[in-house]
Image (spheres, rainbow, N blue to C red):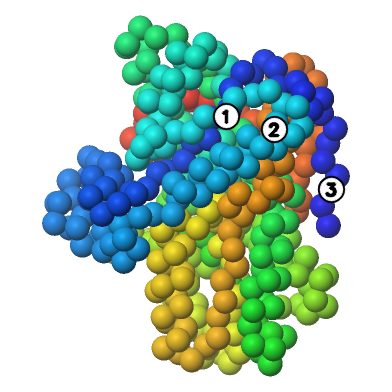
Amino acid sequence: MSDQPPQHDPHDAGPYDALLLLSFGGPEGPDDVVPFLENVTRGRGIPRERLKEVGQHYFLFGGVSPINAQNRELLHAIRKDFAEHGLDLPVYWGNRNWAPYLTDTLREISDAGHRRVLVLATSAYASYSGCRQYRENLAASLAALAEEGRPVPRVDKLRHYFNHPGFVEPMVDATLAALAALPEDVRDGARLAFTTHSIPTAAADTSGPVPGHGEGGAYVAQHLDTARVIADAVRAATGAGLPWELVYQSRSGAPHIPWLEPDICDHLADAHAQGAPAVVMVPIGFVSDHMEVKYDLDTEAVAKAAELGLPVSRAATVGSDPRFAAAVRDLVLERAATERGRTPERCALGTLGPSHDICPAGCCPARTPLPAAAGTD
């Protein structure tokens, strides 16, 4: 189903001399939970007691989020893929909210003499929290290096990869596997619920470049395009055109602020009321099985489905699939070739085409403007 990967020089990442895997971070033990949540919510004035309540989701899993372990696996997969293809590019890892912290990692990168760094964020879609905020984090960390008198490397962020075959194809296979895990008598009529993180509608409406701002913005459009590609591939593989919908999960924040809907649990209730025999939950908005997948889907949504008597299964996330690691290599070589003045082919499935390399002015704006790296504003 995929386009053939473009042909790049597999040994030439120049002018780049390092790749940074940039992620959210998560606690790795009970004592980490509240300090981690304090990092996540810094500046919002949320009382410590409230954070302890929120932390119960983590305590159900021993205070450990799976995201750091999954990032270690992805880091290993990328390094392995690079080595097997003769790409001599060191790969580092830094987080927004927990160790290894981004500033510490950039300090290590600077001290190692690297001056041109590509950044892979573990968020495939356009949004403030999934792109612009990471760019703000980069700018703040680079400013800290400058204050310390260290050389400040130039950082460029890889384009959004929501429609790259190496991201989409593992999700197609995971959806087929989750469908096969349902009881045989309900498979043919099952619905596909493509899930992603809910965000405020105001943030969704202004996601992506300014010309595309409007209802849902790039955030919703990109998810819908990815969902459509996967649903079409499932139809091609099974011969069944299963009904599907884009739904949301993990809402937080004040209840009076509109967020993207429907919520996955509400969707399950509606699907059951409409006579759906089963639902496959496909978390297309998440690169790995972090806490919001393990709790909001595997715990809360599964419990809701059991209450309804509705059979459900959940597709795996991309994680450290070798095809995703290969996609990272492709994106690196594509961007490197562009920086050298070439015009490489760019892999993209669906109808939206490959995303931009450099975020334009007004793309995914912040409520309070802050300096941001790897963009034009």
Specify whether 156 is left or right of 188: left
Q: Quadrant of residue 301?
A: bottom left
Q: Secondary structure at mark 2?
A: helix
200 over 374 or under it: above or below: below
Sooner in the amino-acid sequence: mark 2 or mark 1: 2
Q: Nearer the viewer, residue 63 or 117?
A: 63
Residue beneath disc 2: 82
Name the residue rendered at 86%, 44% in the picture: 4
Determine contact: label 2, label 1, CB under 8 Å. yes
- Measured as percent of width and height from the top left, residue 123 is found at 53, 45
From where the camera sits, is residue 205 visible?
A: no
Q: Quadrant of residue 258?
A: bottom left
User: Alpha carbon of mark 2 to alpha carbon of mark 3: how far?
Assistant: 21 Å
Q: Quadrant of residue 277?
A: bottom right
Residue beneath disc 3: 3
Observer-side mark, 2 or 3, equals 2
- Measured as percent of width and height from the top left, residue 156 is found at 57, 25
Q: Secondary structure at mark 1?
A: strand
Q: Nearer the viewer, residue 355 or 91?
A: 91
Residue beneath disc 1: 91
| Amino acid on which the number 3 mark rests in the picture | Asp
Specify whether 182 is left or right of 3: left
- Measured as percent of width and height from the top left, residue 33 is found at 26, 51
265 over 364 or under it: above or below: below
